[in-house]
Image: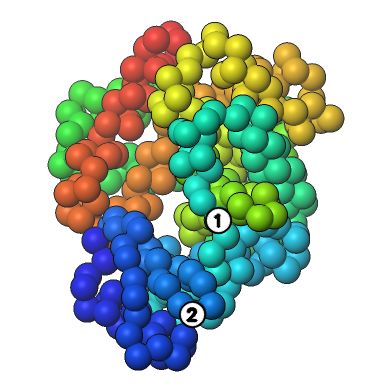
Amino acid sequence: MANDTSDTEALNWAMKLLNQSEVNHTIVVKTPWSSVFKISTPQGLVYLKQTPALLALEASIIQILHDQFQARVPTIIAHNVELNCFLMKDAGRPLREILKQKFDVALLCKTIEQFSSLQIAVADRVDVFLDIGVPDWRLDKLPDLFKQLLSQKDLLLEDGLSEMELSELETLLPKVHSLCKKLSGYSIKQTIVQPDFNDNNNLLADSSQDITLVDLGEIVISHPFFSLLNCLHQVGEHYGLTGNDETYLRIKEACLKNHMKFESKENLLEAVATTQMLWFVYGALAQYRLMQACGKEKLRSFQKRPLGNTLKAFIAACVANEV
């Protein structure tokens, strides 16, 4: 996790910037990949976020989304490049906190449709993000990135994979190529992917009812359905919904709604099924990125065998689908 010395330096910077003799703060998030502090000021709440250097693009990403795409994202107060931290204004309560009290499927669907609209708007201008260092994980790059990951054999063995499982994953490389080619055949443009897009990373303002997208530091450029599948997974996990529930199907429809101008519903559902298989590949790359950014021991102390478990799940999914 972010070390205490670094946290102290960031809080001291915030204190000076906010012109306060002491910072009245509470820890909101503390993980190996980010620390978030809620700070009370006479003008209201602000939030301080700090990340490892390799994940420190968030403030720049937010500013681009705000300035060039008029996206509902946090308002940046200040950004400290040297300390990999930034201050942002309060934007409301996590949507999950609200939905846990009273589930509102229309509100959740509105949130999803707002995000997918942003993804579509960004799709023709991804270079602005690539230019600042956002990773390029588009489908033509994904197989080689996965191959590079599988070459890290010592790391993968440490993370719980067997030699036999490693060999099996290598035999699946042509299938990864095939799945990427198939998914590329649909008229769904690649764009920003928020790896943990869900109701907890969207905030609802009590007064304006504006929905603000947060936690944007790990964005990559890839297939938009990776974000939407994560949302569906989280919905099932946190609200006990299954794939056949009417509410779940309505939420899934919201995930697809804005893409129906490009493809038929039947084709979109086929694309979802293909993306579901590749989601494990994408997820393994995301875990590897966190390992590189945070250090493998720190990440493993927080998540037991994150890479190994994701890759085992990919093998199981391939077996189940007779890939």
Q: Residues within 10 Å of mark 2 (few under 14, many from 20)?
A: few
Placement of 97 over or under 50, stated as above or below: above
In the image, is 318 to the left or to the right of 247?
left
**In the structure shown, which secondary structural element does the residue marked by tag 1 occupy?**
loop
| Residue 196 locus on image (x, y percent) | 47, 43
Task: Identify the mark nearer the N-term, 2 or 1.
Answer: 2
Which quadrant would the N terminus be assigned to in this image? bottom left
> Which residue is at 41% across, 72% downward?
39
The one nearer the camera, 182 or 294, is 294
Label drawn at residue 145: none
The residue labelled by disc 2 is 42
Q: Residue at x 62, y 59 (%)?
A: 73
Disc 2 element: loop
- Closer to the camera in the image, 63 or 173: 63
Left or right: residue 109 versus residue 298 is right
User: Which residue is drawn at the image coordinates 61% and 39% (left, top)?
Assistant: 223
The answer to which of 237 and 130 lies nearer the viewer is 237
Q: Position of residue 222 (x, y in %)?
A: 59, 44
| Residue 92: image tag | 1
Q: Position of residue 227 (x, y in %)?
A: 55, 39
